[in-house]
Amino acid sequence: MRVPLRELRCFVQIMAYRVVAFTMAQVRQGALGFQRELGAVLRERPEIKVYSVSPFDLDERRRFKDRFGGDVVYFFNEAAAQECAQAGIELDFLADISDAELPRRRTMVVGMPERSGTTG
């Protein structure tokens, strides 16, 4: 069965990122260890991306905190979520959101920045 490209794009956008929220107590207890483990495999898996809300956008931080709970909210792309599963990193994903639902201002926590422009 062939899926039209338009429908496939819609599906990919709907399931683009998985959400995890941590309380400050969880952070103090080491919940952010995933950053070190995912960072160690970036050479082999450069498509891994994990974002958080920009620390400078207080309104956006409050909005995502109210929506998902926790003090710190992270957004894992599919490659990051798969690598966590393969590495045995247990995370409680709360929701799947589309790329359009990501915070307007966000910080890359794990991943390689996208290259913009060309050199030469």
Image (cartoon, helix red, strand yellow):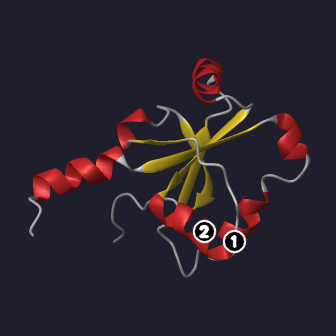
CB-based contact (under 8 Å), mark 2 and mark 1 = yes
Q: Residues within 10 Å of mark 1 (few under 14, many from 20)?
A: few
Rendered position, 67 above or below 88: above
Question: Can the viewer see residue 22?
Answer: yes
Residue under pointer 2? 85
Secondary structure state at the residue bearing disc 2:
helix
> Residue at 26% across / 51% down in the picture?
11
Rendered position, 120 above or below 52: below
Q: Position of residue 118 (x, y in %)?
A: 33, 65
**41 vs 1, nearest the viewer:** 1
Quarter assignment of residue 30 = bottom right
> Residue at 22% across / 47% down in the picture?
10
Secondary structure state at the residue bearing disc 1:
loop
Residue under pointer 1? 88
Q: Position of residue 12 (x, y in %)?
A: 30, 53
Question: Can the viewer see residue 112?
Answer: no
Quarter assignment of residue 22 = top right
Q: Quadrant of the C terminus?
A: bottom left
Hey, what amino acid is under mark 1?
Answer: Gly
Q: Position of residue 37 (x, y in %)?
A: 72, 70
Q: Position of residue 31 (x, y in %)?
A: 80, 52
Hey, what amino acid is under mark 2?
Answer: Ala
> Residue at 8% across / 59% down in the picture?
4
Q: Residues within 10 Å of mark 2 (few under 14, many from 20)?
A: few
Q: Is residue 114 left or right of residue 61?
A: left
**83 vs 107, nearest the viewer:** 83
Q: Is residue 69 left or right of residue 104?
A: right
Rendered position, 39 above or below 97: below
